Amino acid sequence: MAEMILILDFGSQYTQLIARRVRELNVYCEIHPYNHLPEWSDDIKGVILSGSPCSVRDEGSPDIDIDFYSSKVPLLGVCYGAQLMAKKSGGNVLPSEIREYGRARLSKVDSHHDLLKEITLNSQVWMSHADTIASIPDKYEVIASTPSVNVAAFKLKNEPVYGIQFHPEVTHTTEGKTLLRNFVVHICGCSQDWTPDIFVETTVAELKAKLGNDKVVMGLSGGVDSSVAAMLIHKAIGKNLHCIFVDNGLLRKNEFASVLESYKHMGLNVKGVDASQRFYAALKGLTEPEQKRKAIGRAFIEVFDEEAHKIQDVKWLGQGTIYPDVIESVSVKGPSATIKSHHNVGGLPDKMKMKVVEPLNTLFKDEVRNVGRTLEIDPNILGRHPFPGPGLGIRILSEITAEKVRVLQEVDHIFVQGLKDHGLYDQVWQAGAMLTPIQAVGVMGDERTYENVVALRAVTSVDGMTADFCHLPYEFLGEISSEIINKVKGVNRVVYDISSKPPATIEWE
């Protein structure tokens, strides 16, 4: 196992960001909830304690044996983690007299300490806490302050144990990456050798050992995660990997044929299955979003199960699960109660009685793409915008029919191709079109029309958790609107969605 940083999660919304920043240093790390602690391993080189929405002053607030970890490796407490360290060592944590939220400046920096090397005086940091460390015991020393927070950072004398009351993982802390590098690389001594090349090498070796001569079946979507996972398994077992790509009738224009062609050039053993009519039948009469998701999920499982049973002696189910999915399933508060249906290939393992292999379950999305580049996967697949599992089924805001799918496919194609032609595609995290249940009056030539309204959606994001609408040029939007109305029969009005997430979601259903 690679050397790693252990991140103990107390429920902060920023914990994944800490992990991402550590990974950017080419250092492997894992997030574990404070109430699901892993067994200790000598591969652990340091521990980071996350923030939390809780207060250390509350009865029953999250707690761990800090001495156990600080006696073994360097320790860094962030926000709640720092307050917990201070409280358990005899310090005083009180409600803040003034609001300690947002940007602040470091008015004191003891840069001779390893944690604060190259951190400049007056550097901007980002605070987010309702409590503050009013005092620390004599065995600690204050190493950084802001005008309103005396104990902005502290250190256990003569030991590599640190606490900070600001968040180095957010971009608003301008030298946060430097601080985390100081801790992870210089204090913990991590060698920064966790690279995509190493990941591919070690993962393929592990897959060979795990799978041997066994057969694996895997459902492909044409997206990044399933494609990269398939290529890793393929490198390990070759033709013993059997891939199934199902056309649910809800893919984008020409997507079924083009994705199959890409897979053929990648050397994958893929069978394409056109089940579009089966999905349309399952969706007939349904308008409620969750009902549509469940119908699509059930139909997929049925088709995939039938095709998988045609392959003899399959023992494993391959899945493109990535690390955020794993984190969500073992979070501090347990699995999310609001996970949308048709997430990944949910339901297949129980139904099919197979063992599951998930080669990407330690990676974030951007890391998956980096591994894909190492594997020399088709850039058209790697650069593809995220596309929902239910496809256009949740972009048609009414009952789904083949004709509505045709209309939306044409609209979506014009929009996405336009982004590519104008050099805008790579500036957008996700783009697509929605077919609304609204019909509007229009005029074409001398005739009045009563046709569909479509909405275009384009957002920027890092991981889809939050998103802002793209400020696409008006000239571009005008050109695309005219092209859609002129070329797509059944559409006479185009609108652009300028809402961000939150409060709106990226998809409309």
Image: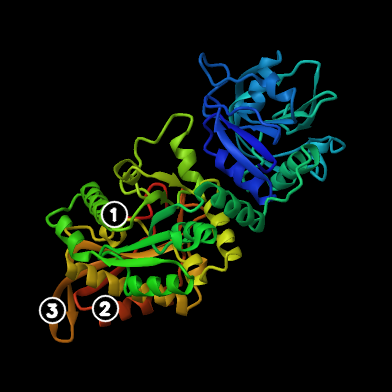
Local crowd size for mark 2, using a 10 Å CA cut-off: few (<14), some (14–19), many (≥20): some
Mark 2 sits on what residue?
485
Q: Quadrant of residue 97?
A: top right
In the image, taking residue 466 as reference, residue 344 lies left or right, namely: left
Mark 3 secondary-structure assignment: strand
Mark 2 secondary-structure assignment: helix
Residue drawn where x is 62% and y is 35% of the image: 7
Mark 1 vs mark 3, CA separation in Å: 54 Å
Local crowd size for mark 1, using a 10 Å CA cut-off: few (<14), some (14–19), many (≥20): few
Q: Which numbered marker is on residue 292?
A: none
In the image, taking residue 455 as reference, residue 383 lies left or right, namely: right
In this view, 202 is above or below 487 = above
Q: Quadrant of residue 375?
A: bottom right
In the image, taking residue 404 as reference, residue 174 lies left or right, namely: right
Q: Amino acid at mark 2?
A: Ile
* The residue positioned farthest toward the bottom in the image shown: 445
In the image, taking residue 30 as reference, residue 458 lies left or right, namely: left
Q: Nearer the viewer, residue 390 or 156?
A: 390
Q: Quadrant of residue 352?
A: top left
Q: Which numbered marker is on residue 309?
A: 1
Mark 3 sits on what residue?
448
Mark 1 secondary-structure assignment: loop
Q: Amino acid at mark 1?
A: His
Of labels 1 and 3, the one closer to you: 1
